[in-house]
Image (cartoon, rainbow, N blue to C red):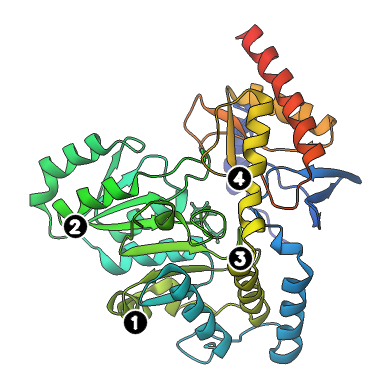
């Protein structure tokens, strides 16, 4: 029999009731994904427009086969941390491939993108250092900054003048400084101004970390946000995930040999956690093969996003992530339900994932979507926006 603590029950039930009242309670639902961006929920099949599987590689036969073969040959789990006996040869191969893709000296693969961000800042910064974080950067960037024990300053989203002001006023009071940002922002789909940000970092001797979770595989010829710019804007710390466009699971940091070597010794989320299972590593390697050879597939998510925005009357998108801002939590939830009635799955994104007052639909496009669904979704979103502006 499970033991129940009355005070713990009182605390959690009160918390839940409060969240419910503010329409901020989240519920986990069974969602079974299959090829072609189909997702089954409650016995009904929807077209998934909120997946980060931008290239449809999670259900690609070649990627699945690679995972199956690796599991059959090497087992289901890796059995230990990489510093003990979890250092599979496929993992080293994956790191060489990612470093080559990104044009960096070295690369480390982590258990997930979230773990990578919990690892990097705390291994490189400490008390007496300064870290500047874009206010809209992903939650795990903020979490990594907090774990590092450096002083944290948030700068306004993509606002170089604000970042400069902070550095001008405070940089001299600290030993090291780091600027942290998403390359492509996860909830807005816009790019960080990397060339200008890197110039600013250089001027103030700050290290720049760019999170390419939504960029690798889909922008800059699959190389990520740095290659989106011409000439390429190469930050010294480029992290990302294997779990989105690459269709598998895991995270990585591409950086210099010295940075990677230091992290191999010092990064707690690498040292004290079990290495990725062989199937995930093999799947990511197979996905990289496809990304590198199939330009049409890489470009299709953005092509579809453009088609959608044109048809829905929205501004042209920069990436395959299209936010449809609706403001209140209830409006976003209602819009999501309306789309669900039409057979589209687009979850409502609410605070604290996005700032208060900017609840939205976040629509993501994948290479395996079909045009007819894009066009029908655009019509539905058009109707939602018209209704919203009437009641606003
Ligand atoms: C999803 C995401 C992560 C986390 O990556 P996982 O591999 O899913 O843990 C990190 N940063 C950004 C910007 C993300 O969107």
Q: Residues within 10 Å of mark 1 (few under 14, many from 20)?
A: few
- Vertical arrangement, residue 322 with respect to residue 216, above or below: above
Q: Which mark is residue 302?
A: 4
Label 4: element kind: helix
The residue to which callout 3 is attached is: 291
Q: Nearer the viewer, mark 3 or mark 1?
A: 3
Instruction: Pick whichever of labels 3 and 1 is earlier in the sequence.
Output: 1
Q: Which mark is residue 265?
A: 1
Side (left or right) of 183 relative to 216 = left
User: Percent x, y for residue 72?
Assistant: 76, 88
Instruction: Pick whichever of labels 4 and 2 is earlier in the sequence.
Output: 2
Label 2: element kind: loop
User: Percent x, y for residue 16?
Assistant: 62, 37
Q: Is residue 150 visible?
A: yes
**Mark 4–mark 2 distance (CA, rounded to whole Å):** 39 Å
Q: Nearer the viewer, residue 261 or 306?
A: 306
**Mark 3–mark 1 distance (CA, rounded to whole Å):** 31 Å
- Vertical arrangement, residue 362 with respect to residue 89, above or below: above
Q: Residues within 10 Å of mark 3 (few under 14, many from 20)?
A: many
The residue to which callout 2 is attached is: 129
**Mark 2–mark 1 distance (CA, rounded to whole Å):** 20 Å
Label 3: element kind: helix
Q: Residues within 10 Å of mark 2 (few under 14, many from 20)?
A: some
Instruction: Pick whichever of labels 3 and 2 is earlier in the sequence.
Output: 2
Whether label 3 touches label 1, CB < 8 Å: no
């Amino acid at each position: 029999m499970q033991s129940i603590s009355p005070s713990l029950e009182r605390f959690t039930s009160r918390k839940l009731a409060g969240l419910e009242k503010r329409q901020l309670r989240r519920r986990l639902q069974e969602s079974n994904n299959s090829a072609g961006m189909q997702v089954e929920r409650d016995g009904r099949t929807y077209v998934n427009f909120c997946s980060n599987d931008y290239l449809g590689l999670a259900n690609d036969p070649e990627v699945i086969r690679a995972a199956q073969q690796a599991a059959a040959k090497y087992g289901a789990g890796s059995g230990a941390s990489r510093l003990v006996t979890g250092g599979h040869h496929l993992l080293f191969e994956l790191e060489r491939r990612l470093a080559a893709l990104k044009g960096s000296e070295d690369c480390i693969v982590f258990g997930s993108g979230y773990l990578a961000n919990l690892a990097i800042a705390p291994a490189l910064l400490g008390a007496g250092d300064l870290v500047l974080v874009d206010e809209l950067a992903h939650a795990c960037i903020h979490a990594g900054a907090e774990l590092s024990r450096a002083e944290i300053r948030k700068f306004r989203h993509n606002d170089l003048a604000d970042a400069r002001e902070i550095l001008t006023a405070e940089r001299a009071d600290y030993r090291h400084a780091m600027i942290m940002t998403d390359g492509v922002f996860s909830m807005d789909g816009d790019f960080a101004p990397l060339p200008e940000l890197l110039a600013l970092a250089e001027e103030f001797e700050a290290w720049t970390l760019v999170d390419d979770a939504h960029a690798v595989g889909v922008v800059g010829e699959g190389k990520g946000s740095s290659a989106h710019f011409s000439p390429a804007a190469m930050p010294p710390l480029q992290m990302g995930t294997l779990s989105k466009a690459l269709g598998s699971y895991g995270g990585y940091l591409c950086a210099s040999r010295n940075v990677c070597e230091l992290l191999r010794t010092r990064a707690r989320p690498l040292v004290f956690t079990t290495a990725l299972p062989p199937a995930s590593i093999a799947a990511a390697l197979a996905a990289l093969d496809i990304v590198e050879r199939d330009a049409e597939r890489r470009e299709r998510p953005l092509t579809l996003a453009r088609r959608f925005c044109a048809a829905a009357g929205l501004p042209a998108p920069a990436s395959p992530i299209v936010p449809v801002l609706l403001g209140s939590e209830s409006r976003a939830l209602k819009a999501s339900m309306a789309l669900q009635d039409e057979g589209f799955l687009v979850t409502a994104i609410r605070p604290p994932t996005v700032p208060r007052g900017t609840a939205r639909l976040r629509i993501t496009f994948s290479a395996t979507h079909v045009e007819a669904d894009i066009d029908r979704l655009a019509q539905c979103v058009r109707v939602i926006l018209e209704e919203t502006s009437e009641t606003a």
